[in-house]
Image (cartoon, rainbow, N blue to C red):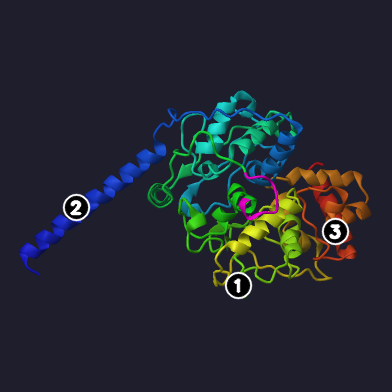
Amino acid sequence: MSQKTRKIFAVLGSLLLVLALVMVARAKWLMERDYSAVAEPPIVADRSPAGLARGELLFQSLCMECHGGADGRATGKYLDEVPAFLGRFWSANLAHAQHGVQRRGDGQLARVLRNGVLPDGRLSLVMNGFGKLGDADVAALLGYMRSGAAAFTPGGKAQPRSELSLLGTLIAAYVAKVSADAPASGVPVPAKAPTVAYGRYMAQAMDCVGCHTDGFANDKLNEPGAFAGGFELSDPAGLPIFSRNITFDQATGIGRWSLDDFQRAVTGGVRPDGFLVRKPMPLFARLDRTDVAALYAFLRTVPKVARKNQAGGSTPRRARADDAPEQLFTNLGCAGCHGETRPYRDQIRAALIKSDEDVASWILDPQALKPGTAMPSFAGAIDRAQARKLAAYVKELARKRGG
């Protein structure tokens, strides 16, 4: 290589280095600058009975999955389902006595939901994904936060600030193209009905499209592989797990699922093959038949994608009659909700005042005892004898935890 050629390559290398540094600096500026000037949406809390019911459905189905602390309240936690290469993320303590929702105005909270701008002016990568929520649903969420619900009973500590990695910063700025540009108001909510329009809205509002579409595009609904799965998350054991294909492809998606199959998976946590839906997939137990039918109707209109589901996460297997109770607790996914650092860690204390038989009945069919509970049904995964064995183990675990 001639000296002239080496000089040309050196100049090109220097230019590329400068370009890379400029891109990094711009990305960091975009993600770390002060967004306090973004207008607060003129949306006020809906405290009507219908608004509170809608707000509870939305919050408990979607928000509590991230903000639910180990005490069962919205006290926040480390979001271990977010892949580590993006950074380290914590959800805010919404029940904090000094910094929780009761200390924030409607406009501040609405701006978090609509634009992803936190009260201190920072831009939240996680909250930025909910800008498709309609005005009425934002108002319903505000109403529920003002309702005095147990989830917001003051307590807990302030959670640390989330930290984007360098790669996460670049992805947010140049791939996801995160911004605070969502309109302050004027976003409609379609009429609740088993229609494609309402289903499309719910698929965005509940972030089905965000998790079940690979990549980091800002508008995943219009991606060629929308709802075909493959997006990487982390399961409760810290293992990489990939979202499933929920297009209506017959071989690799849910094309063979009936509406009843779909409802059982979404609201009951059990797939048609009898295996449990694995975390971090939320259990949308509060969705009713109309919500589910609308989602089903919309997904039937989504282009089918023949994409085989990628293996990952803790290996699912059916329970065996000779499984020890601690194996059932782990393999059935109980630890994902009731483990040491999980959102419903302390909820098992309620088992202490019940008989093993009553707890077993709850494990097998909680929806029959408390419609809308976040607890999945295990009737298709274990028999009553196994449920009694698991019930005794759960009560012993509660005692050891100081229940």
Q: Could you classify mark 3 by the number of other residues whose Cα lies within 10 Å: few (under 14), some (14-19), or many (20 or more)?
A: many
Quadrant of res 195: bottom right
> Disc 2 and disc 1: Cα gap in Å?
46 Å
Instruction: Check disc 3 and report the residue beneath it.
Output: 364
Give, as a three-letter code, the residue at label 2: Leu
> Disc 3 and disc 1: Cα gap in Å?
29 Å
Residue 206's x, y, as percent? 62, 49
Whether residue 289 is visible here, answered yes or no, is yes
Magenta span: predominant SS is loop
Q: Nearer the viewer, residue 159 or 340?
A: 159
* SS label for mark 2: helix
Instruction: Check disc 2 and report the residue beneath it.
Output: 15
Q: Could you classify mark 1 by the number of other residues whose Cα lies within 10 Å: few (under 14), some (14-19), or many (20 or more)?
A: some
Residue 223's x, y, as percent? 48, 59
Residue 220's x, y, as percent? 50, 55
Quarter of the image for the C terminus: give it.
top right
On screen, residue 332 versus residue 135, left or right, reads: right
Magenta part of the protein: which range?
190-197
Q: Indicate yes or no whether the magenta region holds residue 398.
A: no
Give, as a three-letter code, the residue at label 3: Leu
Q: Could you classify mark 2 by the number of other residues whose Cα lies within 10 Å: few (under 14), some (14-19), or many (20 or more)?
A: few
How many numbered circles are shown? 3
Quadrant of res 159: top right
The label nearer to you, 2 versus 1, is 1
Instruction: Check disc 1 and report the residue beneath it.
Output: 252
Residue 344's x, y, as percent? 73, 45
